[in-house]
Amino acid sequence: MSSSSYAPLSMDDLVITAAGLKRRFGALVAVDGVDLAVERGECFGLLGPNGAGKTSITRMVQAVLPRTEGALTVLGLDPGRQGAEIRARIGVVPQGDNLDPDLSAQMNLQIYARFFGAGAREAEIRARELLEFARLSDRSEDRPAQLSGGMRRRIILARAMVNRSELLLLDEPTTALDPQARHQVWTWLKGLKEDGLSLLLTTHDMDEAERLCDRLLVLDQGRVIAEGRPPDLIRRYAKEQVIEVDAGTHWEVPEAVQCETHGGTTYVYFERAQLGLLTGALTAVGLPYRVRSANLEDVFLRLTGRDLRT
Ligand SMILES: Nc1ncnc2c1ncn2[C@@H]1O[C@H](COP(=O)(O)OP(=O)(O)OP(=O)(O)O)[C@@H](O)[C@H]1O
Ligand SMILES: [Mg+2]
């Protein structure tokens, strides 16, 4: 990825740039001065609790939600003035289900292909290919209401590929998918990235973010609270390993290790070299514990707290 080199990036290398991006809804500031730069060919993640502003950012990039303030470019274009051109060159998996309820699966894809300029025959072939890709060829005549939530999601994913776009906006693409379908989508997204597509991915699935994202932002209440590559964020915020101790209040955690207690469980973040010291102390007081590697979920919870967002 070019971020590891020292050559300055030109605008051609950046598929999305935002500086001081803001969006207000009345008195609420949903996006509060966000800076970001997505490089061509990378998967860039947007993480954050419910209401953090992820969908609002995605919709401004998609040029369907005007920004209130700040600068934004998408494929070098201005969403305020060149929205149609941007939308023709990107693929979008929105957070909600926006398939046409009156059209069959096949026609939902076919109409989209026609909309983006394919001829009648070409649109039909393209829609069939994409249904096959979504492994739903046998349901081509079903309307959305006759399909399961996960099947509808797969059609929306296939639809995002209709115009062979160079940038994909994916707002929680794998929500509601079963494990097999989720793994299929991950393989698919990795393949698209290898083909040079750029991805802006919102997810609440930290495993997904860790597998797919080259870099990511953590947002909270419209502001960026952390940014970086997943392994760097894990190292910075959650060290190397985590011990989980139930009934942690009975245990005096040694000084100089970071820990948090939530819901009756203490999470101790530490470097591998401290393992013997910590497990020895736990064994001495007879407390059961679990040791595991630190992951992005730890980072997310440390940064945004463990309380449920309303
Ligand atoms: N059209 C709208 N009108 C008024 N408020 C809105 C509108 N769209 C979003 N908001 C508000 O903006 C804030 C950010 O919403 P947004 O949908 O961007 O969050 P999100 O990070 O995508 O959350 P989630 O993880 O739940 O999808 C929320 O407080 C939401 O209520
Ligand atoms: Mg959202």
Image (cartoon, grey):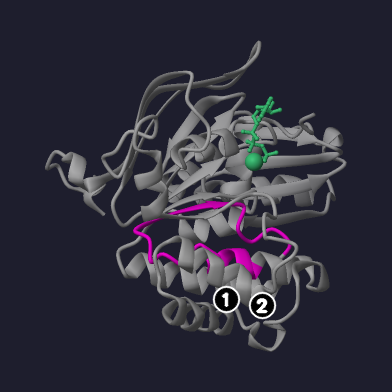
Tell me the tag on residue 180.
Answer: 2
- Residue closest to the eye, 294 or 80: 80
Rate crowding at label 2 as few (under 14), some (14 to 19) or many (20 or more) other CA atoms within 10 Å: few
Tell me what residue is drawn at x 58 percent, y 80 percent.
Answer: 131
- Residue closest to the eye, 137 or 224: 137
**Residue 12 horizontal/vertical position (percent):** 19, 46
Mark-to-mark CA distance, 2 and 1: 6 Å
Element under disc 2: helix
Residue 126, above or below 31: below
Tell me what residue is drawn at x 71 percent, y 33 percent.
Answer: 260
Q: Which residues are magenta?
A: 154-176
Q: Does the magenta run of residues contain 170? A: yes
Element under disc 1: helix
How many badges with numbers are in the image? 2
**Residue 178 horizontal/vertical position (percent):** 72, 71
Q: Looking at this rendering, what residue extends furthest in the top direction?
A: 27
Q: Amino acid at mark 1?
A: Gln
Ligand 1 location (quadrant): top right
Q: Looking at this rendering, what residue extends furthest in the left direction?
A: 7
Tell me the tag on residue 184.
Answer: 1
User: Is 11 left or right of 106, judged from the image as shown?
Assistant: left
User: Is 264 left or right of 283, judged from the image as shown?
Assistant: right
